[in-house]
């Protein structure tokens, strides 16, 4: 199986859904400026094509950047504190550490040659500007291309305004057929009416239409859609009358931003009532969404659920909605400027609170479905699905935090998503939201208890043992008061996890043993029974009882196999590898460790990967390959520092690591060790996995 997108070097640029027309000089200027300036901000009014231009130039120059071109969409972000989390997620960094997010970003980018595209920054300038400065200082080969309706006012920034397209008459010597505004109209019109061409019968009207629309691409594209029912001359006549009415009796031209709003408003008026209503209601979605979500959020007695698909089809035909296929099915997206317009209409209709609440309810139900299904055979599906819905999850959480009385539901949503925070690479974000929501909902309750043990679980994954223990103890205390026996048991399990990481084997044995005993009935398989079994097995290993550890692990592996569970199964194979190595069965240990690593490629389990690589390094040393050991250690340690606290800061892991380093240096000497270590540290995470598995042969040491 291929490694997840965030582990590869080529980047994550979105596919260009429509052809790009014109802008030859602008693209040349932008290319030249990006060679000279490390921070370039593309500015301009809404609908002028800032994002589209940035995406086009990014695709053109992507091969110039050794480590890829990466894209982060900030359009629907509401919390400035989430900017660094959003960029981290876009880069594919599954950051588990408790450090400042900017520290992680800066360290990850430090020696990489990357173009980072930050799209739609104007509402977050105060957060984006200092972050870009910090990242550019830390990463000498980083370049940032931002889009914003206003400058970031950041040090070293070069601002390049995206003007409207040239229109016929701007250059008297220009042939109207080669004018870029006319070309855009012709291209979009041809998509609507396949046999349409700009010719001598309509070029005068098309030219005047483009002039009336001030060369604004979005306005031109919306006008082209009208060709399904109107001729170019009819469109021009109706639009001219409308604009003249708006401009007043003097018939003076509208300012460009008003031209766009007028064009959008005209398109809005020409929609059927059901289309206008759905347009407004769809504005509550962040990024893209699926049909099922639209049906739930947008339907009522005035717009039946069984009509939603047909109305969506009409909005796609009118270029209000974008439609594109994904492996999980067809998804839809409102163009950002049109989403803002729809949001204004939703406010006028008085429906914003209701639709935002229904949006939250849909994603709460989705999160609960994911939680209940996580330990079953569709685990990889839910991993992919919830990462895909990440933007909408954030909007749902922000609703809970911004509306009085909804904080408790926010806790419910957050804690149902424990698997997203722990297993899908968003630990820091989970802590950020949990701490905010727990503070906003201080009264003891079952919801708080669940949120507290989830917070403890995430902090353990981050290596924040003191924080994990504090949350687990709070959970235990409040669970007793609330009469929540399940939370008491899960708090006990989380206290056992913290004790294991702290090296307190006696306390860990007692607490994890209690958790296992009470979860044997099959409830709370994950995060209750299965993690407790794996962790108790590690404690038994530390106590010199590998046979007992293996017995537990075989039971865990059987349970995982029966249920179709993969994520914890990979950890069971990892600990099985440790147990087999402890009894001198190095060949079996190698097979088990690689099996763990292969499973982890289904998930963005970065820390699980580096744990396996650490063990493979030790096994290579045992089997007489110290140079390979050093290379694996270098690769693992570089990723530990980037994605989390090395070896979780836990004596359970650090003692073995330090011994391996010491023995390796003794065998090959410091100089050879340092050379191989440095070579490993340069491997991307994807390359490291392939190297560790030997799937494609060894990489040459540089």
Image (spheres, grey):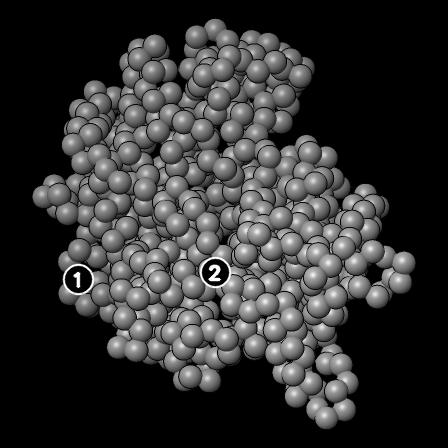
Disc number placed over residue 484 in the picture, else none: 1
Q: Nearer the viewer, mark 1 or mark 2?
A: 2
Q: Is residue 290 left or right of residue 265?
A: left
Q: In the rendered image, which quarter contains the N terminus?
A: top left
Place of residue 420 in the rendered image (x, y in percent of width and height, measured from the top left): 37, 49
Is residue 685 at all visible to an observer of this figure?
A: yes
Q: Does 19 sit above or below residue 291? A: above
> In terms of depth relative to the viewer, which is nearer, 402 or 116?
116
Disc number placed over residue 534 in the picture, else none: none
Query: Within 10 Å of the Cα at label 1, are there few (<14), some (14-19), or many (20+) other Cα atoms?
Result: some
Residue drawn where x is 31% and y is 13% of the image: 588
Task: Identify the residue position indicated by label 2 in the image.
Answer: 317
Residue drawn where x is 38% and y is 74% of the image: 274
> In terms of depth relative to the viewer, which is nearer, 258 or 586?
258
Query: Within 10 Å of the Cα at label 2, are there few (<14), some (14-19), or many (20+) other Cα atoms?
Result: some
Q: Is residue 199 left or right of residue 357?
A: right
Place of residue 426 in the rendered image (x, y in percent of width and height, measured from the top left): 44, 49
Judging from the image, what secondary structure is the residue with disc 1 in? Answer: loop
- Give the mark count: 2
Judging from the image, what secondary structure is the residue with disc 2 in? Answer: helix
Instruction: Spot the residue most to the top.
Output: 624
Q: Are dots 1 and 2 in contact, CB under 8 Å?
A: no
Place of residue 57 in the rendered image (x, y in percent of width and height, measured from the top left): 71, 46
Place of residue 105 in the rendered image (x, y in percent of width and height, measured from the top left): 60, 47
Q: Is residue 166 left or right of residue 549?
A: right
> In terms of depth relative to the viewer, which is nearer, 73 or 24?
24
Q: In the rendered image, which quarter contains the C terminus?
A: top right
Residue drawn where x is 28% and y is 34% of the image: 566
């Amino acid at each position: 199986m291929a490694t997840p997108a965030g582990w590869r070097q080529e980047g994550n640029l979105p596919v260009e859904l429509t052809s790009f027309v014109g802008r030859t000089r602008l693209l040349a200027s932008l290319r030249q400026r990006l060679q000279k300036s490390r921070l370039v901000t593309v500015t301009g009014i809404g609908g002028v094509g800032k994002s589209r231009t940035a995406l086009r130039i990014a695709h053109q120059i992507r091969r110039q950047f050794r480590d890829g071109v990466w894209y982060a969409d900030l359009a629907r972000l509401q919390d400035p504190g989430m900017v660094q989390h959003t960029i981290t997620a876009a880069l594919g960094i599954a950051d588990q550490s408790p450090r400042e997010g900017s520290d992680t970003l800066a360290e990850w980018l430090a020696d990489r040659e990357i173009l980072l595209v930050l799209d739609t920054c104007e509402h977050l300038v105060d957060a984006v500007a200092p972050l870009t400065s910090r990242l550019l200082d830390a990463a000498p080969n980083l370049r940032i291309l931002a889009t914003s309706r206003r400058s970031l006012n950041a040090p070293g920034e070069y601002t390049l305004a995206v003007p409207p397209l040239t229109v016929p008459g701007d250059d008297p010597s220009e042939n109207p057929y080669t004018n870029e505004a006319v070309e855009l109209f012709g291209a979009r019109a041809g998509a609507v009416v396949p046999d349409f061409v700009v010719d001598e019968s309509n070029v005068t009207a098309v030219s005047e239409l483009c002039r009336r629309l001030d060369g604004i691409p979005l306005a031109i594209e919306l006008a082209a859609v009208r060709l399904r029912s109107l001729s170019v001359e009819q469109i021009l006549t109706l639009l001219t009358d409308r604009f003249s009415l708006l401009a007043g009796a003097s018939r003076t031209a509208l300012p460009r931003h008003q031209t766009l709003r007028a064009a959008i408003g005209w398109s809005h008026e020409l929609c059927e009532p059901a289309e206008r209503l759905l347009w407004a209601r769809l504005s509550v979605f962040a990024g893209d969404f699926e049909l099922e979500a639209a049906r739930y959020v947008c339907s009522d007695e005035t717009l039946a659920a069984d009509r939603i698909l047909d109305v969506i089809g009409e909005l796609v035909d009118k270029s209000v909605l974008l439609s594109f296929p994904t492996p999980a099915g067809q998804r839809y997206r409102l163009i950002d400027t049109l989403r803002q317009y729809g949001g204004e209409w939703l406010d006028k209709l008085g429906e914003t609170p209701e639709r935002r609440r229904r949006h939250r309810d849909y994603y709460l139900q989705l999160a609960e479905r994911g939680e209940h299904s996580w330990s079953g055979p569709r685990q990889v599906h839910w991993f992919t699905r919830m990462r895909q819905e990440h933007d909408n999850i954030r909007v749902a959480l922000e609703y809970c935090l911004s509306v009085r009385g909804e904080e408790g539901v926010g806790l419910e949503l957050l804690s149902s998503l424990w698997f997203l925070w722990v297993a899908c690479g968003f630990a820091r974000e989970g802590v950020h939201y949990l701490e905010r929501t727990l503070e906003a909902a201080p009264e003891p309750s079952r919801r708080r208890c669940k949120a507290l043990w989830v917070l403890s679980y995430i902090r353990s994954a981050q290596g924040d043992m003191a924080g994990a223990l504090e949350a687990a103890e709070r959970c235990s205390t409040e669970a007793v008061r609330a009469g929540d026996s399940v939370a008491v048991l899960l708090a006990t399990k989380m206290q056992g996890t913290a004790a294991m990481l702290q090296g307190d084997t006696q306390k860990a044995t007692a607490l994890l043993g209690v958790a296992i005993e009470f979860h044997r009935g099959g409830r709370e398989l994950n995060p209750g029974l299965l993690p407790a079994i794996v962790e108790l097995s590690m404690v038994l290993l530390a106590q010199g009882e590998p046979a007992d550890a293996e017995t537990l692990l075989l039971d865990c592996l059987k349970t995982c196999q029966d249920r179709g569970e993969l994520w914890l199964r990979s950890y069971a194979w990892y600990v099985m590898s440790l147990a087999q190595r402890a009894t001198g069965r190095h060949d079996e240990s190698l097979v088990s460790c690689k099996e763990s690593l292969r499973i982890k490629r289904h998930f963005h389990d970065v820390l699980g990967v580096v744990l396996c690589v650490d063990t493979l390094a030790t096994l290579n040393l045992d089997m007489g390959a110290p140079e390979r050991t050093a290379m694996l250690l270098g690769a693992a340690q570089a990723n530990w520092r980037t994605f989390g606290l090395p070896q979780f800061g836990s004596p359970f892991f650090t003692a073995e690591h330090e011994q391996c380093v010491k023995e390796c240096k003794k065998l090959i000497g410091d100089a050879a060790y340092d050379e191989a270590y440095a070579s490993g540290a340069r491997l991307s995470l994807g390359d490291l996995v392939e190297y560790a598995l030997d799937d494609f042969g060894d990489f040459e040491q540089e």
